[in-house]
């Protein structure tokens, strides 16, 4: 059975990608994911704040005492010229790319178009096959317009694209006023892939302590409908690869995303709940679904349920919304 697929211009043996998560920070887990059938691995995100923090630490270290010895000022380059990296992350990329044959994708999490660009170059130099920009930005400034928010995403992408030669994917959230247009603008700006969607972690309130609580709420299958909608709308209408990244708990969600038009399907929460061995269950389930229907290639099903390909594309739009509401309770 042919499960091969292309994502970001890379050849993958199947569409199952271990999304950015803490389990991917261990080389042994990356090796196991390859052995268990993962098509690619996205490393955990390195955060813009971490990079800037280490740069500041290095600046502090190299300037200590320089006021006592004037000539010492020439010993070290300035912070701007001295790119400091979280060394272990780059080392993980080097070791992982040397140890496995599947693509290893670095992940950068940030909110500005500076401070992490040089690090993107270093990710490339360390051997990563691609980089995923996980742009996590909450526009809490009430003077910030929607267009300004969109432009920030585009500026980050363009800046990183200008700095590296490896493919660049952009992971976005679902809260743009016109997601389709935003996807097209990112596509035009050079995104090699779009990952739908980033899950923003909102705070809760502890009523006993009257304090904000931040915790990790793992995704569930019922959350797949929003990315399913937009993957179906975008499939075949943008050049960028499309990755699904929410609510993938079983092969059921994998198949649905592929039918909608996803090139790859990423899972993180399920691997956190079930362990990295769950990637094999997803692959086996996908193969079983295809075999039961006499389908021998993903090309036969990918996108066949997208907006472009279904007989009634209005099922993605307002007419279906009205039909659902009017028909509720009549069965």
Image (cartoon, rainbow, N blue to C red):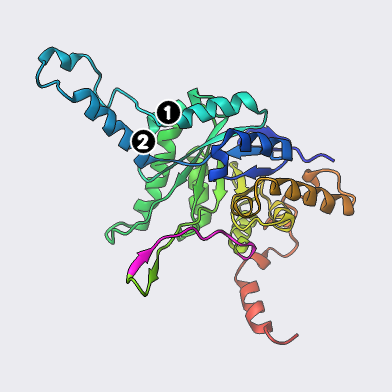
Quarter the N terminus occupies: top right
For the point 64% across and 43% down, the residue is 17
In this view, the residue in front, 207 or 190, is: 207
To which quarter of the image does residue 108 belong?
top left
Q: Earlier in the sequence, mark 1 or mark 2?
A: 2
The answer to whether residue 277 is left or right of residue 87 is right
The local crowd at label 2, few if under 14, some if 14 to 19, many if 20 or more residues have their Cα within 10 Å, is some
* SS label for mark 2: helix
Q: Which residue is mark 2?
A: 51
Instruction: Find residue 305 and report its horizontal and vertical position in percent.
Output: 73, 57
What residue is disc 1 on?
A: 87
The image quadrant that residue 12 belongs to is: top right
**Which of the numbered marks, if any, corresponds to residue 17?**
none
Q: Which element type, helix, strand or loop, lies under badge 1?
A: helix
Q: Position of residue 286 (x, y in %)?
A: 78, 50
**Image: 298 above or below 103:** below
- Residue 253 visible at all: yes
Compared to residue 205, the image places residue 257 above or below, namely above
Q: Are marks 1 and 2 in contact (CB under 8 Å)?
A: no
The magenta stretch is 211-222
């Amino acid at each position: 059975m042919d499960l091969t697929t292309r994502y970001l211009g890379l050849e993958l043996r199947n569409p199952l990608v271990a999304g950015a998560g803490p389990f991917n920070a261990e080389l042994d887990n990356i090796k196991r994911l390859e052995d268990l059938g993962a098509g690619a691995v996205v490393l955990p995100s390195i955060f813009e704040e971490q990079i800037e923090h280490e740069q500041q630490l290095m600046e502090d270290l190299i300037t200590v005492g320089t006021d006592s010895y004037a000539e010492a000022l020439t010993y070290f380059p300035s912070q701007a010229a001295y790119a400091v990296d979280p060394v272990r992350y780059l080392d993980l990329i080097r070791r992982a790319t040397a140890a496995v044959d599947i693509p290893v994708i670095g992940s950068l999490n940030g909110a500005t178009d500076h401070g992490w660009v040089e690090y993107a170059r270093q990710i490339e130099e360390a051997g990563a096959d691609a980089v995923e920009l996980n742009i996590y930005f909450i526009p809490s400034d009430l003077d910030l317009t929607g267009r300004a928010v969109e432009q920030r995403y585009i500026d980050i992408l363009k800046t990183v694209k200008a700095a590296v030669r490896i493919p660049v994917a952009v992971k976005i959230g679902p809260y743009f006023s016109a997601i389709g247009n935003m996807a097209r603008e990112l596509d035009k700006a050079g995104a090699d892939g779009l990952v739908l969607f980033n899950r923003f972690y909102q705070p809760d309130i502890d009523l006993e302590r009257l304090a904000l609580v931040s915790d990790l709420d793992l995704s569930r299958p019922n959350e797949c409908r929003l990315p399913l909608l937009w993957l179906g709308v975008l499939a075949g209408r943008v050049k960028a690869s499309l990755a699904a990244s929410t609510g993938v708990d079983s092969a059921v969600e994998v198949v649905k995303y592929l039918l909608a038009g996803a090139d790859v399907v990423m899972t993180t929460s399920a691997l956190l709940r079930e362990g990295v061995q769950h990637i094999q269950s997803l692959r086996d389930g996908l193969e079983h679904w295809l075999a039961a229907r006499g389908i021998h290639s993903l090309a036969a099903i990918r996108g066949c349920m997208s907006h472009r390909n279904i007989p009634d594309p209005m099922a993605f739009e307002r007419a279906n919304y009205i039909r659902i509401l009017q028909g509720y309770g009549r069965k």
